[in-house]
Amino acid sequence: MADSRDRSTLRQLVGDLVARLDANTHATLNDAFIKVGMPPNPPEEGTKRERGERSYAQVPDSDLHTVARNLLANGYANTAQRHRIEDVLWAESSPSEIPSRI
């Protein structure tokens, strides 16, 4: 089970990737949100970054893993970001214990 610190870390790491969605145009931004599992929002309301932040703020913690995995699958993370997110996802999934001696 994930503690709130892990969830906070994951939310911050994924939020850094969400900022990269603003490379889309206003016209394609909602499609990008939907593709990664975030809710769309009206294009006339704010800058692309503001729209991304608003959409991401609506993502419940229960859907955070899905959004993280979709962002990774769609190439929004560099190697270091991907590894940090994968580590948090793995830690939250209650991995089996690996004995020191196999």
Image: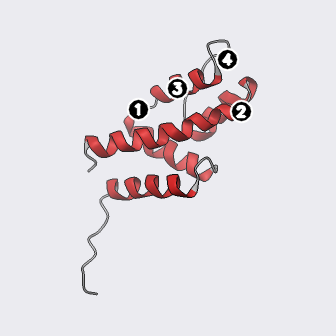
**Tag 4 residue:** 43
Q: Which amino acid does label 1 sit on?
A: Pro
Q: Residue under circle 2?
A: 24
- Residue drawn at the location 52% of the way across and 22% of the way down: 54
Q: Distance between the residues labelled 1 and 4?
A: 22 Å
Residue shown at 34% from the left, 39% from the top: 8
- Marks 4, 2: nearer the viewer: 2
Q: Distance between the residues labelled 4 and 2?
A: 12 Å
CA–CA distance between discs 4 and 3? Answer: 13 Å
Q: What element carries label 2?
A: loop
Q: Position of residue 67 (x, y in %)?
A: 51, 42
Give the CA separation, mark 1 to mark 3: 13 Å
Q: Where is residue 5 in the image (x, y as percent from the top left)?
A: 28, 43
Q: Which secondary structure lies at badge 1?
A: loop
The answer for how far apart the CA atoms under marks 2 and 1 are is: 23 Å
The amino acid beneath tag 2 is Asn
Q: Quadrant of residue 91?
A: bottom left
| Mark 2 residue crowding within 10 angstroms, few (<14) / some (14–19) / many (20+) | few
User: Which residue is tagged 1?
Assistant: 60
Q: In this view, does 4 lie to the left or right of 28?
A: left
Q: Mark 3 points at which residue?
A: 53
Quarter residue 24 falls in: top right
Name the N-terminal-most of marks 2 and 1. Answer: 2
